[in-house]
Amino acid sequence: MPHDLPEVDWRVISRDLKPLALDRYCQRVLAEVTAVINAERPSHDRYLELYRVIDRRDRELAQTFNDLRRSTALLQLLGMWSLGLIEKSELDQLTAETRQLLLSIRGSVTEQ
């Protein structure tokens, strides 16, 4: 996906959208972990489920948030959006060209 990400969009993604999405992601995982811990099941079952949740969510977090670079920012932003961590209205902070590219890519992916 060759696209020269404008500096203004890079700043919005790295300074505004990523921290917002990361906080939402962590809230979601903490709620999921709390539900596992408070479940009416034997302790060992809860422990095993907790391990699986943390392992799965940690891999998802790494793929979505780690090593954000200007060259990967659009793909990572698409990942955040696909996980429901970014609202479409929050993308209004980006330039029209970048928004259109994101909508186009997301539309192509969902049509497959």
Image (cartoon, rainbow, N blue to C red):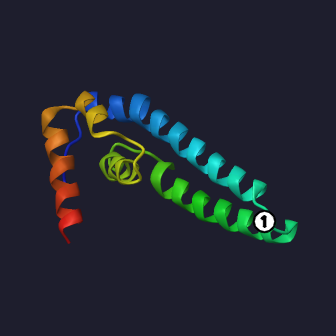
Decide if residue 1 is in sight here.
Answer: no
Of the 4 image quadrants, the one containing the N terminus is bottom left
Asked if 49 appears above or below 27 in the picture, the reply is: below
Which amino acid type corresponds to the residue marked 1 in the rendered image?
A: Arg
**Residue 86 x/y as whole percent:** 37, 41
Identify the residue at horizontal 77%, vertical 70% (top origin). Answer: 48
Query: Is residue 53 found left or right of 86 in the rendered image?
Result: right
Identify the residue at horizontal 40%, vertical 34% (top origin). Answer: 17
Q: Classify residue 36 by image quadrant.
A: bottom right
Q: Which residue is mark 1?
A: 46
Relative depth, front residue between 62 and 54: 54
Of the 4 image quadrants, the one containing the C terminus is bottom left
Asked if 29 appears above or below 17 in the picture, the reply is: below
Identify the residue at horizontal 23%, vertical 31% (top origin). Answer: 92
**Residue 30 x/y as whole percent:** 65, 47
Query: Is residue 101 found left or right of 77 in the rendered image?
Result: left
Relative depth, front residue between 45 and 102: 45
